[in-house]
Image (cartoon, coloured by chain):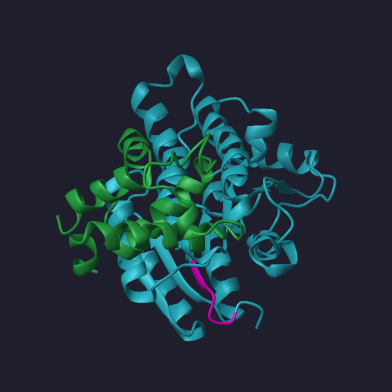
Amino acid sequence: MEFKDKRVIVTGATKGLGKAMALAFAREGAWVAINYSSDDKSALETESEIKNIAPESLLLKADVSSRTDVEKMISGVLEQWEYVDILVNNAGIIRDKLLMFLNEKDWDRVIDVNLKGTYLCSKSIIKTMIGRKSGRIINITSPSALTGRTCQTNYSASKGGIISFTKSLSREMARFGITVNAVCPGIISTPMTEDLDEKTKKEFLNMIPMGRFGDPEDITGAVLFLASEKSQYITGHVLVVDGGLG
Amino acid sequence: MKEIVNNSEALIEFLKKMIIDTLKLEDITVEEIGDDTPLFREGLGLDSLDALELVVAIEKNFNVIIEDENVGKKAFESISTLAQFIQEEYGE
């Protein structure tokens, strides 16, 4: 049990990649707090699965783009758990449109949830980590940040910003024994990718040398590695897990 | 802690020890830190990341939160200004 009694928060954790990460930590003995914004049904299902495995768990409904929500969420966790060892900033949304048709609302919402959410959650958690001179922050980015993608100027900007944020924060936190890294999942089978049409799916598969979409479990290994003691000398790094997509 | 905060001498002594312990300043003693010695750049030579640790330590010891960089800069000019800031903010 590599993460026995380690206290973990995963944002956007009730579906897809976030859920897989939360379950992976729970299987390794961690106390797992799962955040979600609105899908109560999925949240309760995931909470039930986590509760069966994790020694302790919390369900946190909060919009990560809201400072008051985030501060309330983090202070609530700290009141109950005293401290947090690991934060995974996974919460993210897409609003794909060609720039010509991308309205301000869809631009702002994606930037707010994906990038601002990462900033707000990280800012709220670092005090406890600095006090303990220990911590792990793992931010989830995207290949879209590295190569760009049509219809994703907002999404790729938010995920690109996460990379820069990761690198800068890693420099601030290094002397406190806190590592800050990013994981860049390739194209993974999740609710977000299930909505793709068949033509697009085939195009993507042809781009992946391994010839398949990733499973959420392919990503959890990378996240758990960066959360573990094994990665204590790695910080400011972007770990790409994409089957060779590049 | 209330007694310490209300006694300027005791508070200054506490803060000097807190800074030495928090930042692990092994080569400096409490006696060597002047009340009006600048904490940053010249004087004690602390940097902005040291300030982060001190902000956390102040919140932990006094429940006084420093959220604004400009407020922090003024408070952290010296031990005396820090003590005065804490006395003003403590218990609010």
Colour of chain B as rendered: green
Asked whether residue A91 is in view, the answer is no
Colour of chain A as rendered: cyan
Q: Outermost residue toward the top?
A: A100
Horizontal side, residue A193 vs residue A244: left or right: left
Residue B65 on image: x %, y %: 29, 52
Snapshot quadrant of residue A28 = bottom right
Q: Is residue A124 above or below residue A2?
A: above
Asked whether residue B85 is in view, the answer is yes
Instruction: Please name the residue shown 54% across and 29% down the image.
Output: A157
Residue B2 on image: x %, y %: 19, 67
**Residue bounds of the magenta highlight:** A4-8
Quarter of the picture containing the N terminus of chain A is: bottom right
Residue A10 on image: x %, y %: 48, 61
Q: Is residue A8 above or below residue A173?
A: below
Nearer to us in this view, A236 or A22: A236
Instruction: Please name the residue shown 30% across and 37% down the image.
Output: B71
